[in-house]
Amino acid sequence: MDEDSQETQLFAAFERHDEFVAAQNTLLAVDLFVEPSREEEDVELDCSRKLIMIFGEYQEQSYLLDPYLESLVSPVAECLRKYAMACVNARGAQSSRSRVERLADHLHNYIKFRGYKTITRFFPHEVADLSIALDFIRLPSGPVKDLSQWGLRYAVLLWLSLICRIPFDLQKFDDTTRSGETANAIELVGKDRLNMAGLEREGAATLLARFYARKDTKEQFSSFVEWSITIFHSSDITLSIGVLQVLCELVKSGSSEQLQAFVQQFLEITDTLEQSTTLASNTLVRKYRTKLLSRVALRLMPPKVSRSKLTFRSLDGDIKNKADNGNVDDGDEDIDVPEEIDTILESLFKSLQDKDTVVRWSAAKGIARLSERLPSEFSSQVLETILGLFSIHSVAGASVYDTPAVAEATWHGASLASAEMARRGLVQTAALGSLLSWLSKALYFDIRKGAHSVGSNVRDAAAYVIWALARAQDPESFSPYARELAQWLVSVALFDREIHIRRAASAAFQEHVGRMALFPHGIDVLRKTDFYAVSVRRNAFTVAAPQVAEHLEYRAYLINHIISITLRHWDVAMRELGAQALRRICELDLTTLGLECASKMAGFLRSVDVSDVHGALAALTGISEAYRAQGNEESASNRQKIFAFIAIISQDAVMAPQNGLVLAAACDLIASSLTLQEVELREKSSVPHWKRIVDQGLRHRSSSVQQAAAAAMATTSSLVDCSPDVHRLIKDFRRGPQSLQQSLGYTLGILNYNAHPHGFSEVVKCLLESVDSNSSARMSSIEARRNCFQALPKIITNVLPRLTEYLIAESMYGVLNALDSGLDDYTMDERGDVGSWVRMACIQGLASIFEDLFRVSGSIPEFASYLPAQMYHSAIARILRQGVERLDNVRQIAGRCLLRLFCIPLPSVPHQEEWRIKGSELMMKLFLNDASDAITSWSVGEWLFPKAVELLRVQEYRQPLLTGLIHSVGARTGSTHRPASSSLVSFAQGLPLSPGDSDYSLFELCDDLIECAQGRTTSNAVVVPILQTFNMLLEADILSHLSNVDNGPSKSPSFPLSVERN
């Protein structure tokens, strides 16, 4: 499936600042202790929605609000502070639940928008605020106890965590008789909410981490560590996750002196987590355990200056490093590495192979951060171990496609760790070759697993590694690998299945072009494979790839990639696109590349893998079509050589019923490569069984295979007369099973009757009998009838240059009459209104024939006998009826065809005005008044029906149009029923009561509605919508004045009586 990216609008500034402030002020101005009235509630909800909408618009550019954050957030936080103080001072006061919830949600939206670390800086943080926040959250019957007020509890917890960072003595808030009361209260507030899943746990963990980081809470932290060990032994998952969050946050931000004493206990905790089956099965537990291990290891190692080697290009084009590599302090060799580091690294390497991505990424970042602090030799060993993970599931001499699916996690973890190491400049030149060797395989890691594949995250991570290497390595170390690396990245950027990987490879290519300047034709290729060019898969394959292949440095590699990977891909769509891409590239030098690529693809025709055979056939078809487009004798000879490759495939593989893809591809290849010489050779042909392949395709149950076989028959029909074959098909398929009936319409409609007759009169007779409701030969299958209806206009178009030779006026009348009668097909089955397939085919067929006849009208004597004006207007009216009926897709097809007919010139015959569409000026004014009307879809009822009801003023089309409108009024879907009903009511309200100078009246409308039901009062599908229409007009008080009109609706008395009788 092609991906079509919809990019977010970019802003230069916070343009909606004033609107945002006004809405926020409205929310802050309310009294939180008073319940709002209904009007106030609506206003406040509108303001809240507006604020959320603005947040959403700027979410991707949240930094634009940074200059305004203090002035925006401070009033909201101050409002919360005042509310909390009022609740504390007036215990038991009742507040408005909805208003408090909106205030808390607004504050939470700020936090979600910019992050809690940024937003909490603007919270009140005076020492006196501690008692306010603490008392507020502990109120026994306060608003924080309401289960729905989770946003309020989260905000207050973050507020408390900010206050805890102020360096004041907590004992100042204690009573003299109860020392430590405040500290215990804060700790209890945090602990009570650690077992609540969601943001409350996040806020409680932040609060406790900052609380224990204080210098006056060492005893409490020691008790917390002991308590946490008991929690982990109890295997309470929810509470364990909260405790781990506290420990991870504290180890990250706490003082080294405080944490050194607890290192062994932290390591014991990680062992306990690993040994607990219940806890180890939880993803978040494993993630936080990995974070805790890596952060403890960082605390064991002394900090040092980063060895980052970020590169950049100066304006003169020179490549420079941000830090001179020669100035790296070599004193790191004297660092004493604690023994625990080995154990921690071993555990982190194990986490790199975890089944969950978040655990692998945490381990990758932890390993890279720790390696920064290790001696160079030690960090090199770490990188070697990471590269060794790639080989765990690899077999010598095997390709990446032979790797088991379970290797996905290992390869992904190793790639992420390599990327994090590369970002920090920890990949030495000596290891670069080995790393790139593994990355060349990781970029193509796509392992088939059942009906899908795994490995997209591995390919994404591999592109991330290459991107990171460009930012940290020097050009000299990369120069030996530049050409190969450029080819890898371009092939992935163009031919990967996933959009995010194509973009990632393009970004990595761009980074190397900008920082290294080593890739051949880097700027030009980057322009052809930029972010937008590779976003749509079809564009990447069929447009960008041939453009890049213009450079000889990339052409051979791209062709080899298509042949060896893309055309053997598990996804059918990828193989088909690969075939198209190969054709476009070969067309750059078809003489050299055509047969060379075809010969390579022929080798895959012997494969036992259906995907290989299908991809090879699709590629050969594309190359053959390229040769056919040239149209010279040498091209015909080359097509004959490609045709001979079909003989390589085992007949059993082609003919097997389950191999429909191969059969369809073989028929496509026959259609594109068959030549007159091969047809004339008959049994001596290089592929003597090619006719059996086509015949098998025609008999296949899949419609796509039937169409491919019909295309092969069309090619044959352009070379020789196929009358005997056509006669046999009609005899065998007309009364065969449904699949054969369907195939008949495909085949008869696509034959080249202009080159040879092919029993034309018998074909037309067969098609007309197949759709005639009064014929015993009528086909029962709705799909078969649809195909026959689609075949009729194709045949007319085919013989159009010699129309009068093939068709007499009576036969043309029969074709038009058959298509017209198809507009009444309302067949229903378990799939719904399947008759709509026939109606859409007939609408398109009639429009196509009208266009064709008008175009050649000057060469048709007695044009009026071929297309009588009365029949033409009747068909227009019936198409117009379909254009206002209940099905959106039918209306869309009818509208598109009508607009085409509005715009075609009149036939070049005498009295041409007879074929002018009635009311054409009104129609053009309604539907083609401006450019937007031409592109607006007729499936949009709100746009269509107000215009369509105006056409009731055109008498010639009134009855069919009204019938269609009635059906839409009775539709069950609101998107059709509502606009149709309201439009008809509005139109009726504007009509005069009785006929007069006006072209239409309410009196006539009622008579026309009753006439629609005459003779069909036993059909609920007709009567019920009409009754609904009358009921709707009565409810709108439109018919109340008709009783005052002399000679009211003439048919009104008989209608209710006939309905009652039936």
Image: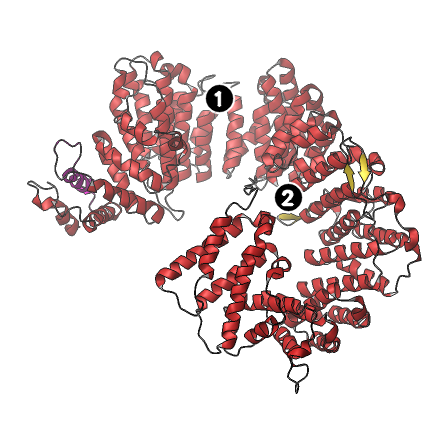
**The disc labelled 2 sits on which kind of residue?**
His
Vertical placement of 712 versus 245: above or below? above
Q: Is residue 1016 magenta?
A: yes
Whichever of labels 2 and 1 marks the residue nearer the N terminus, that label is: 2
**The disc labelled 1 sits on which kind of residue?**
Cys
**What residue is drawn where x is 92% and y is 51%?**
330
Judge the density around disc 1: few (<14), some (14-19), many (≥20) Cα neighbours within 10 Å. many
**784 left or right, relative to 678:** left
Residue 157 appears in the picture as rendered: yes
**What residue is drawn where x is 36% and y is 64%?**
37
**433 left or right, relative to 106:** right
Quadrant of the image containing the N terminus: top right
Residue 618 appears in the picture as rendered: no
Q: What is the basis of the colouring in this image? A: secondary structure
Residue positioned most to the right:
334
Vertical placement of 227 versus 845: above or below? below
**Where is residue 76 drawn, in percent x and y?**
53, 61
The residues tagged by marks 2 and 1 sit, at their Cα atoms, a distance apart of 50 Å
- Range shown magenta: 994-1017
Residues under numbered marks 2 and 1 in contact, where contact means CB atoms less than 8 Å apart: no
**Where is residue 127 drawn, in percent x and y?**
63, 71
Q: Which mark is residue 722?
A: 1
From the viewer's side, name the closer residue of 741 and 251: 251
**680 left or right, relative to 1055:** right
**859 left or right, relative to 223:** left
Judge the density around disc 2: few (<14), some (14-19), many (≥20) Cα neighbours within 10 Å. some
**Where is residue 812 drawn, in percent x and y?**
33, 22
Residue positioned most to the bottom:
177
Q: Which mark is residue 500?
A: 2
Residue 811 found in image quarter = top left
Vertical placement of 680 versus 224: above or below? above
Q: Secondary structure at mark 2?
A: helix
